[in-house]
Amino acid sequence: KTASVKIKDLITKNEKFSSEMIRKSSSHSDEATSTKKQRMPGSQLRNFSIKPVHKFNQGFPYFRQPIEFGHFSLDGQRRFHNDSSQLKSFQPPHVDYDLEYDLRDGYDSHIEKDDDIKERLTHLLTWIKRNTNKFRLNNENAKEQVHQLNTDFVAWRGHFTKFLCTPYETREPWKMAVTLFNGTIYISEVETEKAEFDRKHRSPRQKEMCYWGFRFEGYLTKPMHEACDEEEEKQPKVTNTNEAYCSIVRTRLKNHSILIGAEVDCCVKDSKAAPPLNYVELKTSRIMQHFKQRMNFSRYKLLKFWAQSFLVGLPKIVVGLRDDDGIVRELKTYKTMEIPQVCKEFRNCWDPTICMNFLDKLLSWLKQIVTIDNKDVVYMLRFEPPFDTIQVELIDDGSECFLPDWFVETFQTQEE
């Protein structure tokens, strides 16, 4: 009966979304280069073909070990701090035989981030603006002002994660705005109509489940300056989803230099390893009891877990396995580098080589088509059914510009 109700709700939800879309449509009949690279306009726009994915199976491409380039914190009011004040330490339970973390606890009193406010790249750009000297090349005069980032691509980790998973994605569309400014390509996600519809029509149960991951972090982490108190370790403080600690990571995929901003859950406090090798990713997932559940977990969730952590060099993922009532019964640890091997248990699951080669080819394609160096010119990428092509549209009227004036003026002032 429960399954029938869920299927009925899903059909109703899809019908609502389809009706909404019809209504809307009818109503609107070496780190890069040492000198600034101006890509010449005029390249013919062409879509990027994904299928067949086996064409990307060409041997694993060169990928440099990610290194932490910087970090910042966001407080409970979403204010930027150029420090590590929000970094938390990993505090696993001493024993887990009686593990019973209630992820529903504190839901009624938690402080929720306003998802209607679209921050785009704001906090990442703020960090760049305050740390421009970090982008200076070794051969540049330390007294001279920095005129460019000497970096090919800048984006949040989530954007690159979606790119990596795209060869195997058949369910969720995405939309990315891309712009070339001062020799660097910036990528910013745009909420699709489907994502907005789903977000605004979540059931009470879905809203609560979105909170569970944050509550899980509260059980397993402590602020760096606080000692672990066994009396309180099962009673996390009020959850505020505005708070975040973000690591800025630099890496290279073949000839693409990349700067990635990534929210980090916690670190191993006394580890001798330098960031990001001392960071830990925390996730939750439903307890798996059947073969199909394990297959879907490997096919979808482990692909995303691997992509998120591999991109920024996080070595370990701790997964809280929960029941349908939101009670975590078991903790399971996955080493990022071993996840692809774990998934080989299931035939035709996913291949990290295909994912990484796909990302390399996609970034090369972007360099070829994103040619106009102007913040007001945006190349809009769309990935949608039938999920076999990434479509691109040039928008040059400034309506989709996402680089704020205060960021652009930083470099213009330096050049003047």
Image (cartoon, rainbow, N blue to C red):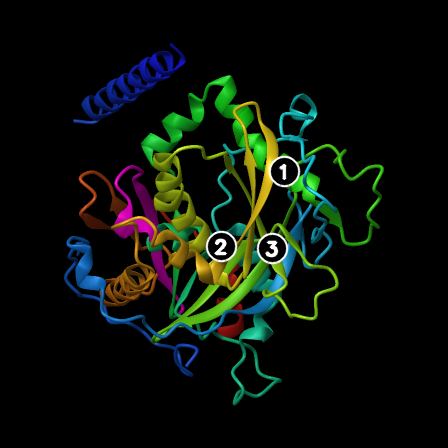
Task: Tell me the CA gap for discs 3 and 1.
Answer: 13 Å
Q: Secondary structure at mark 3?
A: strand
Point out the tag, 2 or 3, that comes first from the N-terminus: 3
Q: Secondary structure at mark 1?
A: helix
Is 232 positioned to the left or the right of 127 in the image?
A: right
Magenta-tinted stretch: 165-182
Is 87 positioned to the left or the right of 411 in the image?
A: right
Determine whether label 1 and label 2 are within 8 Å by CB: no
Q: Secondary structure at mark 2?
A: helix
Q: Quadrant of residue 316?
A: bottom right
Front of the two marks 1 and 2: 1
Is 324 positioned to the left or the right of 91 in the image?
A: left
Task: Tell me the CA gap for discs 2 and 3.
Answer: 36 Å
Q: Residues within 10 Å of mark 2 (few under 14, many from 20)?
A: few
The residue lying furthest to the top in this view is 1
Residue identifier under label 1: 216
Residue identifier under label 2: 405
Looking at the rendered structure, the kind of residue marked 2 is Asp
